Amino acid sequence: MRKKLLIIGAGAEQVYAYQLAREAGHYIVATDQNNKAPAASLADYFIEVSTRDAEETLSAIQQYCQKNGVIDGVMTIANDVPYTVACVAEYFGLSGHSVDSANLAMDKLRMKEAFKKSNVSCPDFWEVCNLEELIELIKKKNLKSFVLKPLDGCGARGVLLLESTDNLEWAWNESSSWGKGPTLLVERFIAGLQISSESFLISGKAYTPALSERNYTSLDKFKPYIIEDGGTIPADVNMSIKQEIDRLVEAGAKAMGVENGIVKGDLVIGDDGIPQIIELALRLSGGWFASDQIVTATGVNLVQAVMRQALGEAVTAAELTPVRTRSTAIRYWFPQPGKIKSILGEDVVSSLPGILKYGFFRKCSDVQPTIRIHPDRFGYVLVEGEDRAEAIARVENAIASLTIEVEA
């Protein structure tokens, strides 16, 4: 009997999971609000429903199961919907993160409060309910640089890096416009090395095949918006720091009630050399990190591990242990805002050495928006190399080989 796997989301970054599921011979049920989504055609059965609406999704799956039989597993990738996945998994008694843990993952304030209660190292944070509270907090804590963000944001939506002298009224209105709730989160800004981790936990022990060094070299260019320009595997950290990060992820996951399964981390290492957790997400990451970068660099397939766990199969430490050491790097194109007139040099990019994949999110005649959030980026290129130096040189060459002409 083919196992029936529900994949929440059918976007471009979910395609890899569908391909893996088809190779394994699974029957795929897909959900997405767009029935023309890139992965929709790879599913055996498609359900048109918003991935972010957990109740509507659960109701649709219940109706499906009444007519077609139960599902055997549920998962997602590159889609910030852990609550939707958890609701379906809990209702049908499937493997996955709990609803309580998923709730913490979707509320940055509650997550950080859980970290603080369990003495998990993270930057100082405060909740503010209005502009007056924000102004008072900055004075009271003497904050020179800080981050303002919604409690429920993703993709850098509403995340601002600010100085105490900035226009705080504008900042409050801008950040609030991206969130659902009446309050915002203030975090002390820690300058330092930014790290993305992707760990799979087995009985509370974290297995992290690779760390990516997040690239923020254009931070001043986009400020106050915090826009990541890709990343590089491996991160430039020693084995001692890697082990500290594993212990920190384990502690953070435990504080969120997680002992098994995937945990994506955003971390920072300040001048004191001590890693701190900015956030943990209970899902496979986007940016082709799990689907392409980690697989190429280490040989570890975390998407496959999550899929197997979702279907109730055991995942072993051996599957999560790197079998090779290579480097990958991803960067993004950031054209000026305006109507796109031409895209020149794609033939050059496609023929460069080390190219794993590249893609454009817009085409000629589309409008390139001002960069404020990650979805505003024009496109990406992902490369591999023998080491960091080669991967970085290759990806920078690829970025420079494309010209995007824009009519202001």
Image (spheres, grey):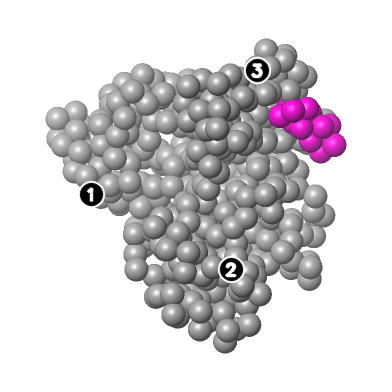
C-alpha separation, residue under disc 2 versus residue under disc 1: 40 Å
Q: Which numbered disc, 2 or 1, marks the residue that appears first in the sequence?
A: 1
**Is the magenta region chiefly helix, strand or loop?**
helix
- Residue depicted at x 68% and y 61%: 268
> How far is the residue under mark 3 from the one under mark 1?
45 Å
- The amino acid on which the numbered mark 3 sits, given as a three-letter code, is Leu
Position of 120 relative to 50 (above/below): below
Give yes or no for residue 389 being in the magenta stretch. Answer: yes
The 10 Å Cα crowd at callout 2, few under 14, some 14 to 19, many 20 or more, is few
Q: Which residue is drawn at 45% across and 80% down?
A: 133
Mark-to-mark CA distance, 2 and 3: 38 Å
Residue 57 in the image: state x and y as whole percent: 25, 42
| Relative side of 369 to 183, left or right | right
Q: Nearer the viewer, residue 394 or 198?
A: 394
Residue named by callout 2: 166
Of labels 3 and 1, earlier in sequence is 1
Q: Which secondary structure, mark 3?
A: strand
Q: What stretch is highlighted in magenta?
A: 388-400
The residue labelled by disc 3 is 344
The structure residue drawn at horizontal position 33% and vertical position 41%, both measured from the top left corner, is: 51
Q: Give me the residue at 39% from left, 57% from top.
A: 177
Q: Which label lies toward us, 2 or 1?
A: 2
